[in-house]
Structure formats: structure tokens, C-alpha cells
Image: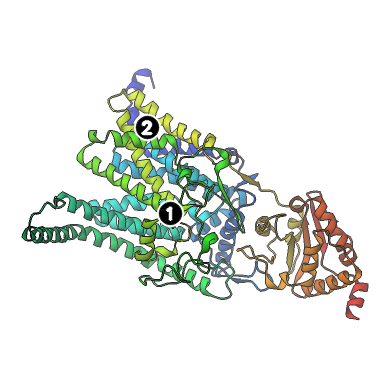
Amino acid sequence: MNLQNLRKIDWSRWGESWWAVGLYYLLLTMLMMWPTSFLVNERLFGDPWSDFWKHAWGHWWFMQMLYIGRLPLFCDLVNAPAGGYIFIADPFNCLCDGFLMRFLPFSVAYNSWVILNVWGGCMASWLLACYFVKDRRACLVAGSIYGLSAYMLAYPVISGVSETLNSAWMPLYILFCHRVVDRGSFSDIIGAAVFFFLTAFSCWYYGEFMVVYSATILVYRWGLHLYQQRLWSWQVRSWRQLKARLGKFAQGMGQAFKAVLPSALKVAASMALAVVLVSPFALMFHLVVSDPANIIMPDKAPKRSIFRFQKFMGNDSPWSISNRGIRGFHNYTNLLGFVLPGKGNATVTVTIDRLTRIHYLGWIALLLAYIGRKRRRELSEEELLSNNYWFGAGIFFLILSLGLKATISDWSTWGIPNPVYIFMYIFFPMFHKVAVPFRYLAIALLALGVLASFGLRQLCRGQQNLLKWGAALAVPVCMAAEVALVSPLPWPLSYSPAQVPAIYEMIAREEGDFAIIDFPFERPNTRLIPGEYFYYQTVHRKRIPYRTSGVLSTEVARNVFMEELSNSQFGVPTSEAIAIRMTEGVKRLKALGFRYLILHRDIMGELMLGYLQRALKPVLGEPAVFADGTVVYLLEPRQELLRKASN
């Protein structure tokens, strides 16, 4: 192809094609997730102390059950020896990521699925912005603001809350929801139903968010019809004029209701179809959580019916210790955090797992949104309505993300009640089930992306084509650099090693059904369960005594051997009487099917390991010591201690 033919190519059309945009976002995603994105066989996305181990384990276990023809509802691999009922909260990820794990190494499959989800969030938010802004180049910033935000990279990726990783379905449902309201064709209704189903099937919280969003767009359209009727002038001089004005206002409200009713019915039809599809899974989830034998964390939301009004000052109030409480409901979102940069300002929680929550919006994005608002008079009437709508929607969902109490910063617990959230909590169906309002930030980021796209388009209006392309490609890169270098997001992203100790490969080759105990139960000086134990189980496939909620099975926790072992890790002196008690405990553990006790030097450290070996030597003898830091004991009590214990 010669130079003359190259000049004939319409590069603007080529650059605006979906596959070129997809390639651009893929490159940006890989760079933002560096270096793990280029070492997918050696590392795993996620902080070693975070929740991702158990979520990734859930994807593996879910598909293992399906492949052997069992419903993934009862698990005997955890909470040994009893097992228990469990429902993995993100079945869509289980189907997709679990399928990949059948053909790819665990780390490659999980990392690839994480990258694909982040990339999908970029693409979906770009498509949503294009629907309103009508400029594909300017809308590239929307993908960076939403898909590569500090929120998305910190909470779903680093903390590993994988149900929130499905970031693509919400923008696509919102897109089709607007298309249903705007024109309401049959294909739009089906599209909205499909994407609402995928949203709810991927994450129950996100499904509830879409119900709130659908109500938001319908209320906005109803209010817009009222506004266009000019019913807001209330200058009256007599009772007759006031009565006439009230009658006209009531008539206008009725007309606005009739105008929005067809759209509301179409949205309701799409949601009803989606509910039919997702209801079997929601029913199974509810039954599993309600079962006394469940081994997942119980639902912390207050138990009340959909429309029942409850007291706000008694034991069933949202501030009650028995329901959520001050600690249980702390939302980790504050006003200053929306704009405060600095790597030391990430909010980190320490409960049964360490979670990183960041709600930084980005100064470049806010500046572009401000420009779009400042120059909104240059927009057409339709675009002006869209700009106003997304501005209001963004503020609304930012307020919801603050939770029950709006606080100023992480440095102070002082705050004021959030009336918007309280109103929604009382009156909106199922709203009280959202125990982590922080996640509403995702929809606010979508709104910010649309507003910033308007701003970039207005900023580049009248400029040469080359300058427009340069800005469209450079600004998202600058936003990504701000998130990586300036925001509170830990970057490069935290990762965990994908290597598995050699002992587990040896155990995997052993025949028979037995269980193993990994120790310590908690990371030193914390209440965090080492999540690696679940990852190791994907290799050895033997039963372990841990629950996914971070609790040890009752039979093991109350065993005298484990009680004395827990005391020994702190240097408590041993004696022959203690050794005899530990021997009795070992005998019971062996009867329950436990074969090995594995100590992890890399988790507990040399000092604690020394204390434990001193206590275990009289009971179990000498261990097998591996080069990778694991110390393995066979749970076989010494005969002389058994005789003393029997006497």
C-alpha cells in the first residue's frame, strides 16, 4: 500500500471502531495492573491478607461440584469434619473462571478473568457515555474513570471481593434501561432484562443498585414532565386562586404520571423477566443462608419485611448493636476521601480479612466534569437534559455511598445523619439489605465518566482533528497515572505468590479420604485467617477445618490438643500433664479423620515456630522439615503417652 492509499483511509472511523477502542483499553488495563498482568503464571492479583483467596477457591470448588454432577450447595472440603451448606455469592464468576480453571493453571485462569472483567468495565462505561455524548473519542475518558478507578482496582481486585468484579453489566443495563425509557422497542426490553439478570446473578448488591437506578430514571422523567408544564409559580392572592392552582397542579401530576407510565411498564417488564431468571438462584441463596448448618457469614441486614416500617430508636433500628451497630455498619466512606490524594489515605479494614476501600474520584475527572457543567449552555436541548440528569444522579449516588452517617474524614467519627439514605432505608423496598453502601460509588463513577466526557468534548470543540485525537488518547492515560501515582491506591497493585508448598503436592498423591490442619489459625497479632489455606486445598484436595467466614470448626477449636497448641505458640511452659492432654486430643483428631498438622514458618516466624516445636516433640516426635518453610507432623501419638493417658 503506497502513501497515497494511506491518505485515503478515514483514520477517525478506524480509531472510533469498537475493536480499536478495546485494544486501547486492553493496553491501558495491562499497564495499570502491572507487573502481575505480565506474570500471570507466577503471581495472583490480591493482597495476601485479603479476601481474594476464598473467592478464588469458591470459583474452583463450584465447578468441581458441577463436573461431578453435584449441586454446589453442600461442601465437605471445609469446616471438617462436618462440612456444611454454602452458596458462593458470585455464581457467574464461578461458571466462567471455574471453566477456565479446567484448562488453564489456577493462577493463569484467575488472573485472566480479573483482567477481562476490568477491561469489560472500561468498554461498557465507554458505550454508555457514547449514548449520551455522541463523541466516541471524548468518551474514552469514561472508561478510564470507571473501569480503572481507584475503587475498582482496590476493592474488587486487591481485596478480592470478586462479586464486585463484574463491573461491565451495570453500565450495559443502565444503557438499555435508558433505551427502554427513550423508545422502548422489544429488543431494548430483552436487552435490559438480560443485563439486569447478569448484574444480579453476578452480585446481589449490584442487582439491588439497578432497582434503585431504575426508580431514579423514572422519577426524573416524571419530574421533568412536571417541570415542562410550568406548574411551579405559586403567586396567588385569594383562596379561589389557590384552589385553582392546586387543581391545576394535581392535574399536571396526573398528566406527568400518564406520560411516564408506558416507560415504567416497559422497565418493569424487563425487570420482571430478569427476576424470573434469577429467582431460583436467589431462593437457593436465601435457603442456604437461613439454614442453621450454613458455613458462610450470616446476613447482617436487619430482618424486616419489604414494606414494614420499624422503629428507629429501639432494638430493631439500623443503629442497634444487635442489627448492625456502630462497628458493624461503619461504611468507610467520607467527604474528604472523595478528593484527598496520598498513598497513606487508603481505608483498610481488619476483621476476618483485610479489605482496602478507596473512594477517590480523581481531580482530572472532576475538572473535566466542571468544564462540562460550566459550558453546558453550548449543548443542545437534549444534551443539556442529559448533562443535568447525570449531574443529579451522580450527587444522589455519592450521597447514598456515605451510608447512614455522613462523616468528614477517616480521622474523626463525627458526622451528621444522612437524610437521603435514611429516607431510602425506610421507604424503598429491599434497600435495607445493602449492608455496604460504599459500593454505590460505582454508579457515581459512571455519572462522573459521562460528565467528564461532555467536558472533554466541549473543551476540544473547534480544534483540529489531530488535537482532538491527541487529547482523547492522552487524557485517559493521565487519569490512569493520577490513580496509580497520586490516589490512595497501592500501586503497583498488591499481589500474592502463586507457588504452593511441596508438601501439598505430595499429599495430593496420597490415597484415602482424610483431613489436614494448617497452623497458625490466625496471622500473628491479628484476627485474620491465612486465606492461603483455601488456595492450597485446590492442589491437595483434602478436607480442612476452616470455614469461609474465617471461623474454625467446633470439633477442632474445642479439641484439647488444639487448645494447648494455641497456648504453646506464645511460649507457655509445657509439662508431662500437658503432653498427656495433647495426646488425648490427637487421638480424637485422628478418629475424626485428621492425618497431618502443617506449621507455616513464613506466617508465624521463627520464634513462634520454636515454641510450637518444643511443645510438639514429646507428643508427636520429630517433624518433616521442608526447604520452603513448612514443618509437617503426622498426627500419630506416641505409644507411651497413650498408655499414660489411658491410665
Where does residue 602 sit, x and y in percent of width and height?
A: 75, 50
Q: Quadrant of residue 214?
A: bottom left
Q: Count the marks.
A: 2
The residue pinned by badge 1 equals 416
Where does residue 504 sit, x and y in percent of width and height?
A: 74, 57
The furthest residue to the top: 3
Residue drawn at (88%, 77%), measured in percent from left and top? 645
Q: Quadrant of residue 598?
A: bottom right
Quadrant including the N terminus: top left
Residue 421 in view of the camera: yes
Mark 1 lies on a secondary structure that is strand
The residue pinned by badge 2 equals 15
Amino acid residing under circle 2: Gly
Q: Nearer the viewer, residue 488 or 340?
A: 340
Q: What distance separates the C-alpha of mark 2 from that of mark 1?
A: 48 Å
Residue drawn at (49%, 68%), measured in percent from left and top? 285
Residue drawn at (7%, 58%), measured in percent from left and top? 238
Other residues around mark 1 within 10 Å, as few (<14) / some (14–19) / many (≥20): few
Residue 135 in view of the camera: no
Mark on residue 379? none
Where does residue 131 sit, x and y in percent of width and height?
A: 30, 43
Q: Nearer the viewer, residue 73 or 1?
A: 73
- Image vertical order of residue 326 relative to residue 629, above or below: below
Is 265 displayed left or right of 427 in the figure? left
Is 171 displayed left or right of 296 in the figure? left
- Please name the colour scheme applied to the rendered image: rainbow
- Image vertical order of residue 57 relative to residue 125, above or below: below
Where does residue 599 sit, x and y in percent of width and height?
A: 78, 57
Mark closer to the chain start, 2 or 1 = 2
- Image vertical order of residue 360 relative to residue 295, above or below: above
Mark 2 lies on a secondary structure that is helix
